[in-house]
Amino acid sequence: MERIDFLTEARKFEKDMINLRRSFHKNPELGFEEVVTSRVIEEVLQSLGIETKRVAGTGIIGLLKGTKVGKTVALRADMDALPLSDEKKVEYASKVPGKMHACGHDAHMAGLLGAAMILSRFRNILPGNIKFIFQPAEETEGGALSMIKAGVMENPKVDAIFGLHCDVSIDTGKIGVKYGKANAASDIFEVEIYGKSCHGAAPHEGIDAIAIGAQVVTALQSIVSRNVDPLDSAVVTVGVFQGGYKSNIIADRVRLSGIIRSLNPKTRTMLCQRVADIIRGVTSAMGANARIELIPGYPCLINDNNMVDFVKRQGESVLGRENVVVVKEPNMGVEDFAYYLQHAPGAFYRLGVRNEKKGIVHPPHSGLFDIDESSLTVAAAMHAAIAFNFLWTQ
């Protein structure tokens, strides 16, 4: 079989991908609100002769069937934007106040649609099936779970799944691969501390919930430094502290909210227990009560090393060995692609989008976040090479 130059194939659709990405960027939609986004994706896939199915509200599955019997490989892109104001001065800036594609999901969608454009041209020699998974709500509720419950990994059964994420620490034209643990697990804690209000001039008559909450926040910072193995990694963050009424009133309640991140299952269990124990202990010792809710979040994303090897080989073939970076350390951010990897082997890799000359250096979840759009051809070429060669070689 003649070798396909997937990077050259991807460049044929560069303008289409840029236009799609800019359209998505100008019209961002939050998790499970991706109505227009889904419609655009359906129209593009259907125009390529790819079967589509709507699942989990706004999720889309595209199925490209080869002419020969074989395995099924899945490629996934997330769709949702963030509740953030776009601060960039570009013509494709968000037109929706308070909503922005600040994590690259617009690029993920455009790159995967580009791969569909490439792969649909080679359907006559495909020995198997390719599923294109467009998933809502990665940023909020773990839309991957809703997609899995809707049967995205079945009918036909997915034999392997791959996905990517924009990475502004890696230059455009490169990809990054990470063996084993790639992203952290997370758990959210919601806390209300109940004290007793009184006049600020007579603090001895009350129980100061704000002072107690401050002690709780300080005590929580000791968990990682004193309870976690220094060779392990963990983060405990208090991101919300709300309380008080007026400068001369001792507050009777405060609300805290935070997140626990970990890479080790035993550490994860221990962290949740220590957070709860410390909150109860501090509040009780200071005469207050606390309500604690621990909400399990995404699991640790653990790549299959054989699939990482496969992605690495495709990257070296498509981009050149010098453009494949082996990432040494995991990312302590979370990613619900982890749920798919509980159902099929696969790998989640990183797409370089950094370009210092263009000023594209700002981190994700920032109002200035942007990508070098030439990375879209890399995304499409990598997706296409991975899917096509998996069906032929694995």
Image (tube, grey):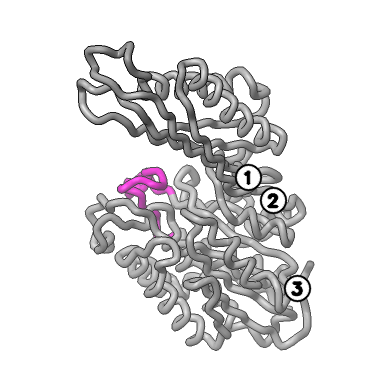
Q: CA distance from mark 1 to mark 2?
A: 7 Å
- Disc 1 marks a residue whose amino acid type is Ala
Q: CA distance from mark 3 to mark 2?
A: 21 Å
Write down the quadrant of residue 193 in the picture. Answer: top left
Earlier residue among tags 3 and 1? 1
Earlier residue among tags 3 and 2? 2
Viewer-side residue, 58 vs 7: 58
Viewer-side residue, 42 vs 308: 42
Question: Where does the N terminus fall, quadrant-wise?
Answer: bottom right
Residue occupying the point 53% across, 40% down: 293
Q: Are marks 3 and 1 in contact (CB under 8 Å)?
A: no
User: Is residue 200 in sight in this rendering?
Assistant: yes
Picture disc at residue 303: 2
Q: CA distance from mark 3 to mark 1?
A: 27 Å
- Disc 2 marks a residue whose amino acid type is Asn
Q: What stretch of residues is rendered in magenta? A: 354-374
Picture disc at residue 392: 3
